Each structure stands twice: as structure tokens, then as C-alpha cells.
Image: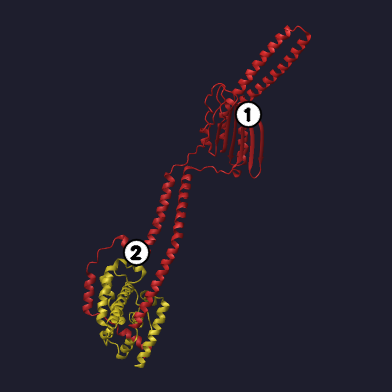
Amino acid sequence: MSVNEIVDELRGSRPRASEALRLQVLTLSASPPPRAPSLLARLRGTRRLLLALPAAAGLAVLAATAIGVTRPAPAPVAREAVATGATAEPSIGATPPPAMFAGPAQDSAAAAQAKAPAPTTGRAQRYGATLTLGVEDTDELSAATQQALAIARDLGGYVVSVQYATGDTGAASLTLRVPSAQAAAAVTRLSSLGTILAQNVQIDDLQESLDTLDGQIERVRAQIAALTAAIDRAETAAERARLLERRARTQLELRNLRASRSGTAEVARNATIQLELRTEESSATPAPGSRLDRALDRALAVLAWEAVVALAILVAAAPLALVAVAVWLTRRTRRRREEDRLLAAS
Amino acid sequence: MTLEQPLATRPPSSVAEAAEAHLDDVFGYLLYLTRDRETAEDLSSSTFEKALRLWDRFDPRRGSARTWLLGIARTTALDWFRAESRRRRREEAAALDERVEETFAEGLSPELEAALAELSAGEREVLALRIVLELDGEATARVLGISPTAVSTRLSRALKRLEERVNQG
């Protein structure tokens, strides 16, 4: 008998279920199926995993978006370190400590609102400010430099020095003097010329020095008056010559004191503002984006953290997963071998 | 020799419909596997009981109802073989042989029947699936949990042995 004949005979004598079995199975199959399992029960193995993975990813994105949108943005106001006594009226004769105002990057709009501290009215003070601004490009650098000069002139001040250099990037350094009364306004207006990268304002009280000088001048003037009277009363030529020489020395001292007072008053009269302008390429701090950009940034940051956590979990779970896969493969192989043995022996 | 599978029809909408269409296939497969009509009937019944319970998991995109039912039938038969093996070890008696009928498929010649009885269950099941039920290689592989190539190898061996036994007898 050939293989073809065997095949034909096997196919020709295909077994058929008995009528009794047919009836039994059809009756059984027609009965109502057991209670439908829940959705979770129906999602088994890989299906659960396939559903769980995108669900977890969706939750992570949702959480990141929610945190990004709802978390309050960091206030765009510069951190301030204003020493006490900067604007308080000190008592006569007392030497107030220098006032410092320093801040990191902030945007121009915020800067316009956050005014720099002004010198105290009625007191002689040395006002110095350093302002570092970022501008978009060299065109803006040029325009900002011109505007800075215009602001100084507009406020009754003048330019002490200007350094301007451009290349791939650009920078300008300006030293401006403006009346002390206009110092705060000048800082505020100059701040609007670009993105503030750094800001520093220092106020030193000079009133005590002026008061001291005034006292010394009065004393010396009194000495000169006394010496003049003594010269008039001198009885000998030698005494007169000695007094004249002494009065000349005292008059020289008076001139020096007056010059010193004039210098100190001049310092108090005008504030010095050091303005540094840089193009954005050369500045380290990028301009903050819109509210949407910031929300997106925060959401991305949260997502990045979630990814880091997920990666850490993956790294920790990977060895366990490998062991589980190895166990599963071993069990499957053993089960198949056992089945083959069973079928071979039967 | 042609081993083509009949064209697949639309998937059944219920176990009853599947039973009506594939009961003979399930029974024939189990009969070839166990060589015992009574056992094959019991296992067929168990197979459809399980099918009723698991019907929600049946996905026509992953295979036909016939393949799915034959897979359940195989698991059911293997459980039976395990139980039978334990029972035989316990009683140290060839209980299976006692129950085996001389003619398990009507219409077979005595030589072929005897030759089939000499084959192992593993060889008979691949003959049942590929020759008698005319499943294609892919579907048979899915039922047996092996590759289509392994199915071809098993089938060739089984046919060769069957031919040898028939011609020896």
C-alpha cells in the first residue's frame, strides 16, 4: 500500500461523532454561557500590558501637563538684597551703611516696574549703579547705545565714556553721570533698553563728611578772623610777620577744605551709572519665553523626571524580568518535552 | 497527495454554531489521539464545555474556530494523558491498552487500523490534523504549538512509519 493510498483511505474513513455525542454537545453548547467576565478579567496577559502601557504613558503626560499649567511660575521679579537703612532717614551725624541693590536677570517689563532705590532727598549721597543688559543683536546694540546717551542727556546728565565694539557678537560699555535726583529714573529707563542680566545699585551717605568739612571750614574761618585781629593788634614787626605767615597757612587750609567740600558736593550732586550692553549671543541667560512656553517647559521638565523614574524602575526590574522570562521559557520547554513524552508513550 | 484545507467560512457567532460545524473534527482528532471512541467522546464533551467557558477569548483574527477548538481539544487530551499516566503508574497496569478498541474509525482496513495502533499518539495526532481533518501547516502548527517546519517533519515521519507498518503487516 502506497502513501497516497493510505492518505486516501484515511480521508475516506473520516471519523464522525455519534448522534448521542452530537446531541449531548449541542445541548451543552446551547446552554447559556457562564456569567460574562468583567472587562478586567477579559483583558488578559499581553492585552492587559498593551492597554496598561499607553494608559500609563497617557497618565504621565496628563500629570506633566497638569503640573506644568497649574504650578505657579517663578516670579519674574529680581531677587533683591536691599540693606536696611538705604532709604531710611538717618539721624544727623550718624553714618548710615551703604545701600546695595543687586539682582540677576529679569525682563524689561518687570524692570520698569521694579524701580531702583532713589537717593534720600536732602542728604548728600554718592549714588553708583551698574547695569548689565542683553540685547538681541548688533543692530539693537547700536540703537540701545544711542538711546542710553539720549536718556543721560534728557535727564540733565552727560557721558563720561563710551566703549563700543561689534563682531560676531557685540558689547558696549558706557559711563554716565546724571543728577542724583534723576538717578532712579535713569536706571529705570535704561533698564528698558534690553534684558537685565545683572543690576547693582550702591548708595553711600556723604552728608557726615560734608558736615565735618563745614565744621572745619567754620573753625578755620574763625581762626583766620582771629589771626587778622591779632595782626592788627601786633606791636612788633616780628610778631606781625609771624601772625601773617600763620594766617597765610590757615587761609591755604581753608582753600583746601573748601575744595574738598566742593568735590564731595559734586560727587553727591551727580550719580554715576555704569551701563554694560551685550548682544544675546554673548549673554549667558536666555530671555524668558511666554507663559505658554514656560508651562511647556515645566511640563517637559516633569516628563523628563518621569522618564528618569521610569528608566530607573526599568533598570531595577530588568534583571527580575529576565529571570521571569528565563523561568517561563524553561517551564514551557519542560512542558513541551513532557507532552512529547506523553504522546510518544501513548 | 493533496493536503489542502477547505476554504474557511465565516466565523461562528456562538459555541453552538461552532459545535455544529466542527464536532466531527474535534471528535476525529481526539479519536486518533486516544484510539478509544468512548474516551474521545468524553474528551469532546469536555472540550466543548471549556469552549463555552472560554468563548469570550475566541478571536477570529488570530485563527479559525476549528483551530481554536482543536487547541482546546489537545489541552484536554494532554490532561487526560497525564491523568492516565499517573493512574497507570499507580496501578502498574496497562489500563489504556485494556480500553483500546480494535476498530476506532469505521471504514479503515484492518491492516491500516493495526498500523495506526502501532504509532504513537504524537504521530497519530499529526496524521489526524493534516491528513484526516486536512488542516494546513500553519493551523496544525498553531494547534500543536510547534513550527510549520516541525509539523512537516513529523508528518513525513508518521506517514513513513505508517507505510512501513502497513506493508510489514
Give left or right: position of B142 versus A267: left
The one of A84 and A162 positioned closer to us in this rendering: A84
Residues under numbered marks 2 and 1 in contact, where contact means CB atoms less than 8 Å apart: no
Q: Which chain is depicted red? A: A
For the N terminus of chain A, the image quarter is bottom left
Q: Which numbered marker is on residue A177?
A: 1
In this rendering, do the residues under marks 2 and 1 share a single chain?
A: yes
Indicate the secondary structure of the residue bearing disc 2: loop
Q: How is the image coloured?
A: by chain
Task: Determine the image quadrant of residue B169.
Answer: bottom left
Q: Amino acid at mark 1?
A: Arg
Q: Position of residue A205 (x, y in %)?
A: 58, 26
The one of A193 and A231 positioned closer to us in this rendering: A231
Does residue A194 appear in the picture of this structure?
no
| Rendered view: A137 above or below A96 | below
For the C terminus of chain A, the image quarter is bottom left
The one of B80 and A202 positioned closer to us in this rendering: A202
Q: Position of residue A154 (x, y in %)?
A: 60, 27
Drawn colour of chain B?
Answer: yellow
| Rendered view: B70 above or below A71 | below
- The residue wearing badge 2 is A44
Task: Determine the image quadrant of residue B115.
Answer: bottom left
Q: Earlier in the sequence, mark 2 or mark 1?
A: 2
Q: Amino acid at mark 2?
A: Arg
| Rendered view: A343 above or below A170 | below
Indicate the secondary structure of the residue bearing disc 1: strand
Task: Determine the image quadrant of residue A98.
Answer: top right
Q: Residue at x 39, y 56 (%)?
A: A55
Give left or right: position of A13 versus A85: left
Q: Real-space Cα distance between discs 2 and 1?
A: 79 Å
Q: Residue at x 61, y 20 (%)?
A: A211
Give left or right: position of A245 versus B127: right
